[in-house]
Amino acid sequence: MPRARETSSTGGARRGRRGADRARPRKYTRVNSEVVDYKDLNLLRRFLSDKGKTRGRRVTGLSRAHQRQLSVAVKRAREIALLPYVGER
């Protein structure tokens, strides 16, 4: 007789062994601001790579809403020439 599948208390979804069950620390929460502002260039540059690309959510640790605010703020800052479209070469 086959054994019944054992499920964990987290819903039964199996995750990798890299600590995915732990809550990932969020860089954004250390910033202590509610809204990402396009004029705050120091904050925006933290989330841009050397080539000028926006880093992904898995790298930055931002929530979906904050990542969206970040992308809109970067686009606005680029539009009015506060940030370059292309990073340093």
Image: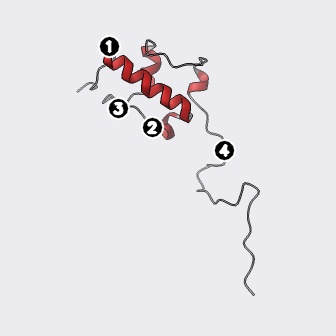
Q: Which residue is drawn at 54% across and 35% down?
A: 64
Say what secondary structure mark 1 lies in.
loop
Dot 2 surroundings within 10 Å: few (below 14), some, or many (20 or more)? few
Label 1 vs label 4, nearer the camera: 1
Instruction: Say what amino acid the circle numbered 1 marks.
Output: Ile
Which residue, given by chain and number where applicable, does mark 2 sit on? 56
Which residue, given by chain and number where applicable, does mark 1 sit on? 80
Instruction: Say what amino acid the circle numbered 3 marks.
Output: Lys
Question: Viewed as shown, does residue 12 lie left or right of 31?
Answer: right
Which residue, given by chain and number where applicable, does mark 4 sit on? 22
**Quadrant in the picture for residue 4:** bottom right
Quadrant of the snapshot with the N terminus: bottom right
Image coordinates of residue 46 in percent, x first then y, are 45, 24
Say what secondary structure mark 4 lies in.
loop
Question: Viewed as shown, does residue 81 lie left or right of 44?
Answer: left
Quadrant of the snapshot with the C terminus: top left
Say what secondary structure mark 2 lies in.
loop
N-terminal of the two: label 1 or label 2? 2
Instruction: Say what amino acid the circle numbered 4 marks.
Output: Arg
Instruction: Say what amino acid the circle numbered 2 marks.
Output: Gly
Can residue 58 be seen in the rendering of this structure? yes
